[in-house]
Image (cartoon, coloured by chain):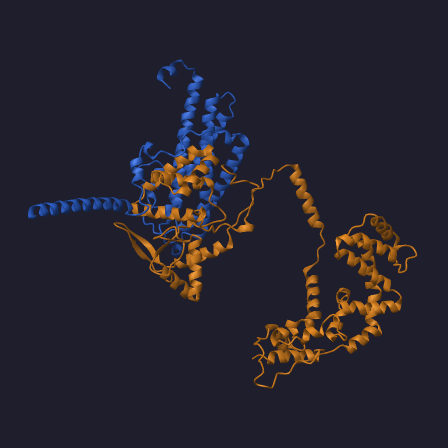
Amino acid sequence: MTINTMAKGGWHRDQMSCFRKMEKVIVAMQDPDMGMKMRNQRLLITVIPHAMTGRDIIDWLMKKYNICEEESLHISGLLVRYGYIYPLKEPRSLVLRPDESPYRFQTPYFWTSTRWPASELDYAIYLAKKNIRKQGELMEYEKERYSVLHKRINHTWDFVVMQAREQLRASKQRRKADRIVLECQEQAYWLINRPPPGARNVLDMGLERPNNTARVTLNSEHYKNEIDTCKRALGRNRVKSSICLEGFVKYSEQYQNHDPIMQGCLPSNPWISDDSAHWTMNLETVPTPTRLRVERWSFSFMELLNDEMGRREFMTYLEKEFSGENLGFWQACEDIKHGESSRIVEKVEEIYRNFLAPGAPRWVNIDSKTMDKTLSGIRHPHRFVMEDAQMHIYFLIKKDSYPRYLKSDLYKNMLAKGIVPQETKKSVFPFMRRQRHSSPSPAQVATQATEEGGNAKGAGQAGTNSAAGSNV
Amino acid sequence: MPLINNKVGDDGTVGKDKALVDGKALVDSLIKVVACYRVLATCVGGCTDSLQLRDELRQTREKAQRLAMAIRSHLTSHLRDKSLPEEQRKEMEILWVGFSSSLELLHVDMCKVFNMGDIFSLSKKETRVQNGLQGGGSEVAARALSVPDLNQPQSTSLPAEFESHERSTMEKDISQLDHMIDDMEMKVNVLRWMVDPHGPQYPDPLSSTDSASLLSVDEEQPGHQPLHQRRKLFVLLLLVAVVLVVATLSICIVFFS
């Protein structure tokens, strides 16, 4: 074994699926009735069958797969680039010319394969063969590679030379036409698998290059690590897909009315109508929020907290209940987590003074264990020193104050006050700038078809209609 | 070694030399068989693929495996022999490296042929790739099996039977080869990077015995060589003609002036 090509622990290679697909196309081309039309290649004395022109290939692909010429050109270009078809006139230029230039199929043995990639030993044998045949006249880059290989697999060089000689002698047994074909095939194979410098390497997959040079020593340490990884993987929490899919469906149902693509935007989608009313109505500091926005606050606590206006409203409510310090504490902790590093110490001090110290003006109620942990952490403040306390307070508010807020009058008033904007009417004036064409999203058309008017948002329905109807 | 030494040397070294010579002969013929197998394997799936080709492949493969078994037992027994003198050991190690490289090539070729047998089944004749080959591989197989002519009667078994039988045998053989390779690594510890080969870097084409016949194989750019010579001849003729014309003109000038 030269360079560990048959390592037992090695990763099992598979044929890349794009190659399997190309192989299927090639096999389809061989059909005696519906396949490619073959011509003969005429060299000076010899006639070699099974040649085809570029034009033939393109026409056949167009006919068989019902595609346009551009796509056919692209696919046939790929077939040539990956070595399933090779050009006969200019072997080093792996492009498909849509004219009379001749091509031939590559024999299956030399098909590009990620399962049995070309090895250094093979390449060395090929170069040795070429060297013998051409009496030393290799191309520059081939000579370089030959010497590099000679150094790298020097121990098996006798074998390389002998094998090269034997292969030449074996192929000598064949008739001349076959010999020519075999040489062209092999040359095409190596042009793909070891491309000349500057040519694109089609087998190079860039950053995803499968790099299995990690020689894993199979000792007890390795197996211990394996066992640990497996244990951890087994211990992970798993959710049945039926349950998490249910959750997914519920989420989608809940948010459907709020999704501009699914339900349309009120008053109108600014990207289409160039009217930015929708955005102005949903700003942070608008006096009256839209009803949809207020509704969203009831979906989850994070929604409420993420919306500035929601947070402010919630704070007002909490002040009334004399538990505003909780939210204040939470906000301050968030500020530390996302704020500047230089001010962390100062902020932590402030929090301690205001919220945690005994007798502080806005003292928060944290259980003793978390309090002790936080206080000891404050001596060495960092960004996440308040994490546990913040979590505690967060869940406290969420379980306690948040549901009460949603039932409170404050929230209900907000909801009632919420604006439901009217959708913009189509302009009557013929000379006004027409709306940009918008094709209705398939989701909208589907919802229109299935909805039976039981939708709570009547305006939403009207919005859909208008969006669909404004399709110019 | 000059003949006189043979008579005074003890039997031990003579025996070991013979072992070396035997081993070399075996490895050489394995290399030859592996080369022939590869040349035959390039035809699989092509338009010349037939029951006969697969049969030839099978025979070549079986021969290769027999040789491999023989070499393995031969080399393992000698390399594990602690009393082997140093130069002999070095030679054996070179043979060992050659042997394992041949096995590597054989393994890959067998896997490829097995895989292609899947895609290009003998029963489905329409799916052959038209790769431009015309002739069969009988002469190559004959060379592999070291018989002057592969004169065998047409196999009477049906393609389907042959194929299924062949596939199961091949699977077994591939795994057997795998095991053999593993086994070898376990039993004999050859430090490959310490092995020093004999030959020069660039195999001198003129030093090989049948270099002339090898050179005649060069037909890569078909018609390229005769064209080259033709061009040289043409240029030469042109020069001669020009010289003649100049000469006649000068004579005319001298004559008529």
Q: Residue at x 52, y 30 (%)?
A: B191
Choose top left, top right, bottom left or bottom right for residue A310.
bottom right
- Whether residue B59 is visible here, answered yes or no, is no
User: Farthest front residue?
Assistant: B257
- Image position of B52 (left or right of A245): left
Q: Residue at x 83, y 62 (%)?
A: A328
User: Farthest right residue?
Assistant: A359
Camera-side residue of B216 and A235: B216
Q: Residue at x 87, y 55 (%)?
A: A353
Q: Position of residue B108 (x, y in %)?
A: 46, 43
- Image position of A347 (left or right of B254): right
In the rendered view, tell whether residue A244 sits above or below residue A205: below
In the rendered view, tell whether residue A432 sits above or below residue A47: below
Camera-side residue of B121 and A145: A145
**Quarter of the picture holding the N terminus of chain B:** top left
In the rendered view, tell whether residue B81 sits above or below residue A10: above
Chain shown in blue: B
User: Farthest top residue?
Assistant: B8
Choose top left, top right, bottom left or bottom right for residue A423.
bottom right
Report how many numbered discs are placed on residues in the image. 0
Choose top left, top right, bottom left or bottom right for residue A355.
bottom right
- Whether residue B237 is visible here, answered yes or no, is yes
Q: Position of residue B14 (x, y in %)?
A: 42, 19
Chain shown in orange: A
- Image position of B96 (left or right of A379): left
In the rendered view, tell whether residue B239 sits above or below residue B17: below
